[in-house]
Amino acid sequence: PCAPPPSPGTVILGRDTAELEELAARYGQPRFRAKQLLEGVLQGARSVEDITTIPKEWRAQLLADGVRTGRSLLHHSVGDADGTRKFLLQLGDGRIVETVGIPTEDRLTVCVSSQVGCPMRCTFCATGKGGFARNLAPHEIMDQVLTVQELYGRRVSNVVFMGMGEPLLNLPSVTRAYHGLNKQIGIGGAFITISTVGVPNAIRRLAGADLKATLAVSLHAPNQALRESIIPSAKAYPIEALLEDCAAYFKRTGRRVTFEYTLLSGVNDEVAHAQELVALLQRYNLMSHVNVIPWNPVDESEFQRPSRNRVFAFTRAVEAAGLPCTVRETRGLEAAAACGQLRNQFQKTPLPQFEKPL
């Protein structure tokens, strides 16, 4: 079981209209003040003091009672020539979380974290090596998107839950953040992707939450033995059970499932692996799409990036069997290393000295 988010007093971000109306009523304020609180935060207020649309006396009361906007502090950022930028955000308890902005001409995607660290310990993942501290609260997830939006000065169009952490181990916060991103920040449900390495029973719970998000399953291997060697948590969740849950998700939602497959040179990148992957997916009654990710060498690691020829041969074998397949272009190679080391340092333990967000 994962640790719950801290109770940070009352924060405005991450709350729905009814909760904010209740907050206003507690102070004898009219209901329309709820909208002013939320709009103030969405428009960039870092502190309640900055929400000038509400009465000064009420601002003072809220501050005295420890009500916060729920925004983080920018601790560090690093950019790449292609426009990708990584941001390390300092949370209210001094812990550090990473978020990434990935711009193209017509889109701005944010890769958000759902936990501080990750307990899944996948062998090829830098976050897993840094240990696990806690789940993120809904406002700490939404804040990442607002931060990227502000720092790029343009609207975020897509959100992918592919940063630090396993989103389905924090499903209540992820679900609330999804609704906030969708209804309050205005990001279409279909433009939000929730990624998982697989948590028993969680995919069926996600299907029951009735979100319009895309489900992306980190498969990374075409059979159980190979998958266990790369993803230790797979021991508790056989690949057949995972795919049965994906088929149940498809049956309930009617939405195609994306399968992420990180190609690790000499480990899972043979044409035979591609053929085995296709045979596996075709055994189940679901619409699927394979997203091939050539491995990104960022930290010291036992793995290597496959050659372009290997990537091409693998994807061609998947497509030849009639499964849609795309290759994710690698972005932010340069920005990754220094940032990952800095982040890992404060993943498990908070910064020794830190300023509290207002």
Image (cartoon, grey):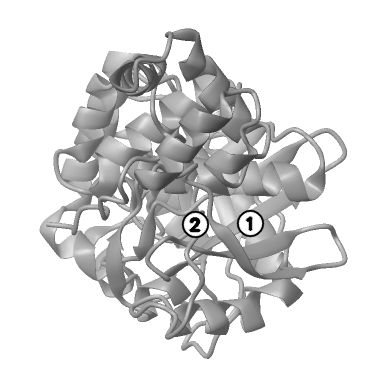
Q: Is residue 34 above or below residue 223?
A: above
Question: Foreground residue, 223 or 231?
Answer: 231
Q: What percent of the width, then of the height, locates residue 308?
A: 72, 67
For this orientation, the residue located farthest to the top is: 31
Residue count near mark 1 (Cα–Cα under 10 Å), binned few <14, some 14–19, many ≥20: many
Q: How many marks?
A: 2
Where does the N terminus fall, quadrant-wise?
A: bottom left
Q: Tell me what residue is drawn at x 38 percent, y 79 percent.
A: 130
Sequence order check, earlier mark of 2 and 1: 1
Q: Going 27% across and 15% down the picture, which residue do you hit?
A: 252
Q: Tag 1, which secondary structure?
A: strand
Q: Position of residue 89 (x, y in %)?
A: 55, 63
Residue 45 sits in which quadrant? top right
Q: Position of residue 67 (x, y in %)?
A: 40, 42
Depth order, front residue of 230/315: 230
Residue 176 position in % (x across, y down): 35, 31
Q: Residue at x 16, y 43 (%)?
A: 241
Residue that badge 1 annotates: 100
Pointers 2 and 1 in contact (C-beta within 8 Å)? yes
In the rendered image, the vertical position of residue 174 relative to residue 94, given as above or below: above
Q: Which residue is pictured at 27% across the width and 24% down the height?
A: 207
The local secondary structure at tag 2 comes to loop
Viewer-closest of 172 and 9: 9
- Give the quarter of the image for residue 43: top right
Residue 163: numbered disc: 2
Give the amino acid at mark 1. Answer: Val
Mark 2 closeness class: few <14, some 14–19, many ≥20 residues within 10 Å: many
On the question of residue 189 being in view, the answer is no
